[in-house]
Amino acid sequence: MTTQIHPVDHELVQAAAQVARVRCRGENHTMAAAARVRDGRIVTAVNAYHFTGGPCAELVLIGAAAAQGAYELETVVAVGDRDRGVVPPCGRCRQVLLDYFPALKVIVDEGEGPRTVHIAELLPAGYVWADHQLEAE
């Protein structure tokens, strides 16, 4: 797979970081996410941790965006509380993000500063949910 260089949306990172600083309190809300919608809006959300599981900030973000009529997300980023910075999505979130938004870009940081990658780069050879929806010929 060829890695394409995408610019980092620093405004999006700052939006998620601000939500993490202001809204992430205690152990129930430790991550914030922000997404850039195709029309330029920014949608934010926090995770909802629970010992039985619970949705990550990226999954809450999908619902929050839909509730605001934002169905075309272009870029997403997650930021940890306590100034942990950009955190890449977990495996479950990678799969859901790929399923809902196959053209999505994700801001990640693997210790060398933030960079933007295509969601498929985070889940190579991943299952494609849309494949099971194809009508049998």
Image (cartoon, rainbow, N blue to C red):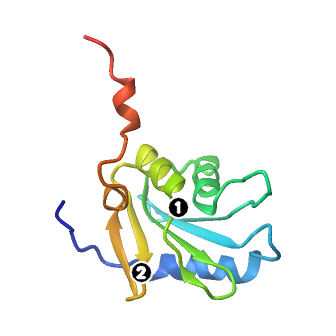
Q: Is residue 136 above or below residue 89?
A: above
Indicate the quadrant containing the N terminus: top left, top right, bottom left or bottom right. Answer: bottom left
Quadrant where the C terminus sits is top left
Task: Give how far across and how far down residue 14 sits, in percent.
Answer: 54, 83
Q: Whole-percent x and y of residue 25?
A: 80, 77
Label 1 sits on a secondary structure element that is loop
- Which residue is under mark 1? 90
Q: Amino acid at mark 1?
A: Cys
Q: Amino acid at mark 2?
A: Glu
Q: Of residues 36 and 111, which is closer to you in this image?
A: 111
- Quarter of the image where one finds residue 28: bottom right
Residue lying furthest top: 137
What residue lies at 49% left-to-right and 75% top-to-bottom? 12
As drawn, the label of residue 123 is none
Q: Please name the residue shown 46% across and 49% down the image.
A: 95
Task: Give the residue number, with chain letter if any, for mark 2.
Answer: 110
Q: Residue at x 35, y 73 (%)?
A: 116
Position of residue 132 measured from the top left corner of the image (x, y, whole percent): 38, 26
Please determine whether, in this image, residue 40 is positioned above or below residue 86: above
Q: Earlier in the sequence, mark 1 or mark 2?
A: 1
Label 2 Cα neighbours within 10 Å, binned few <14 / some 14-19 / many ≥20: few
